[in-house]
Every structure is written in C-alpha cells, then in structure tokens.
Image: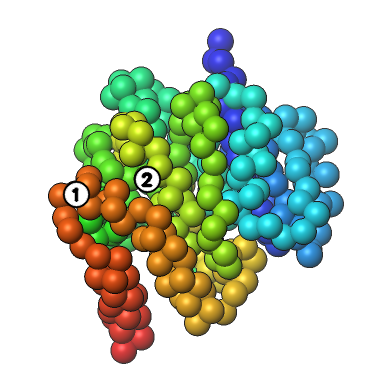
Amino acid sequence: MIKKNVSVIIPSYNRAHLLCKILPGYFQEEVQEVIVINDCSTDNTREVLLEMQYKFPNLIVLENDTNKKQTFSKNRGLDIAKGEYIFFGDDDSFLQEGTIARMLDTKKKTNADIVGARILYMNNNETEFTQCIARHKREGRFVSDLSKMEFSFTAELESPVECFYAQALILVRRELIGNSRFSEIYTGNCYREETDFMLSLYLQKYKFVYDSQALLINLPPQQATGGARTANKLKYHYESVINNYRFLKKFNQQINEVTNDNHTILYRQLYFIYSKLSSFSRKFL
C-alpha cells in the first residue's frame, strides 16, 4: 500500500480560471493533503476552491484577509502542514503523473535532503506539452552558478545531479525545514524569495539534487494571467532589481565564503542588471 505522506503547498492569486485544470494533477497517490492559500483574490477563486473540496476532501483552503504575497502564504501552509514531506507547487504549472513518486525515490537513492524538479515554460504559440518538451530538448540548459547567481533547470539529464540550488518546486522533509520560513523582506513580485529560502537551507549543509525526470510544465503567459504576472513588465523588472539588492545585502558575504570569491554587493548587483538588459536585447532588439 502506498503511503500518503506528502503535503503540497500552493499559494494562489486570481487564478480561478486555471485551478480546475491544474489542481487535480497534484492529488497523486503519495499526497496526504493539498493546501491552497487564497491570497485575497479578487476573482472567484474562493468559490472554485469550495466547489473542488467536494471532489477532493483532502483539499485544505486557507484565506488571507488581505493580499500578503506568496512568502506569507507559503509560511501559512508550512505552519499547518501535516505530511512527513513538503512539496511546493504552483497554481499555473501542470504536475506530470508520477512526479511525486519519482522525487521520493530519487531522495532515497541519492541520499538527498532536497530534490528539485524540472520545470518547462510553454510559449504562447505552443498548444501541446509535447511541443514544449521537444523545444527544450534543443534549448534546455542546466546552470547552477552560485557566484553569478545564475540558475537554469530546463535540461534533460541522464541522471539526478547534485547542485547548489533547486527550482522553487522542491520536495523536502518537513522536519528538516523546522522553523525555517520564507523571508518577507521581498515586496512586489517577491523576486528572490525562493532563492533566499533555498540558500538558507544550503548554508545549513543540506544536500540538493536536481532530477530532470520529475517534471512540471508551466502554462504560456497568455493563459497564466494573474499571480505575479499581474504587474506590468517595467514594474516587474524594477521590483526584481530592488529585491535582488535586498537579497545581496543579506547573503553576499555568505556567497563569497561558499564560492571563494570576493565580489562586492555593487559588483553582483551591476552584473544582475547587465544580465537583465542583455536578456531584454536578445528578445526584443
């Protein structure tokens, strides 16, 4: 008999139009409960979740009385989770069948503390998952560079690999997280809140493993409206720069100690802005 011992935590904001499509995939055999935190959505998220609870009795719904962002919401989920393991999900990402079982197996075989999944992002012109997967067979990258703060987990690898960091969609033992929580110093789009959480765990000498066979697929931007994408692009990138600076003020010294570098906050912040501008120019110029 398969043991149901995983708590899934998913913050959600104005994604009522996606929840009926996305959430059923998270109720995999090993899942004890799916905790969705409605971050004071202005659409009919509350009604959609209430209706879904009739079909999925192990769907737990928490309501924020004001919009408090994903950091606060994830922490609320952690505070009430009962499963032996925690998996952080996403309200616009399809969890592929068997992914939870795969991650539990990888954790056991590699003796990992944290297992990160592969997440692929669909383009607006892609209508099938197979198109997205095929594109990433050509374009997928595996980058885990703590010094430059560059990470990409879209490559399909032959076997799980150890790394500095993992995607936000991780499986971890609840006991290991303990009293650790997502920092609420990040505002707006909360950029770097996940990096903060992951690095805090890594600095405690926990072992991270990336398994590209554990797969989620993120819906294209034209469908995945709501959430952090509600903000316009200029505002989103401005908030990213501000939050990146907050992150560096907190962690730059520890990053240098791990990577044997001597980079200043200013150096890393300017490199981050340069990378943003380079990415923008490649896409639009």
Q: Position of residue 176 (x, y in %)?
A: 46, 27
Left or right of 274 on screen, residue 220: right
Q: Residue at x 65, y 48 (%)?
A: 73
Looking at the rendering, in which quadrant would you find the N terminus?
top right
Identify the residue position indicated by label 1 in the image. Answer: 259
Secondary structure under tag 1 reads helix
Left or right of 90 on screen, residue 217: left
Residue 115 higher or lower than 280, as above or below: above
Say which quarter of the image contains residue 4: top right
Secondary structure under tag 2 reads helix
For label 1, the crowd category at 10 Å Cα-Cα, with few meaning under 14, some 14 to 19 and many 20 or more, is: few
Say which quarter of the image contains residue 104: top left
Q: Residue at x 33, y 76 (%)?
A: 273
Q: Residue at x 53, y 46 (%)?
A: 182
Q: Amino acid at mark 1?
A: Thr
Q: Position of residue 112 (x, y in %)?
A: 33, 27
Q: Residue at x 32, y 80 (%)?
A: 277
Does residue 174 show up?
yes
Identify the residue position indicated by label 2 in the image. Answer: 199
Q: Nearer the viewer, residue 200 or 282?
A: 200
For label 2, the crowd category at 10 Å Cα-Cα, with few meaning under 14, some 14 to 19 and many 20 or more, is: some
Left or right of 64 on screen, residue 179: left
Looking at the rendering, in which quadrant would you find the C terminus?
bottom left
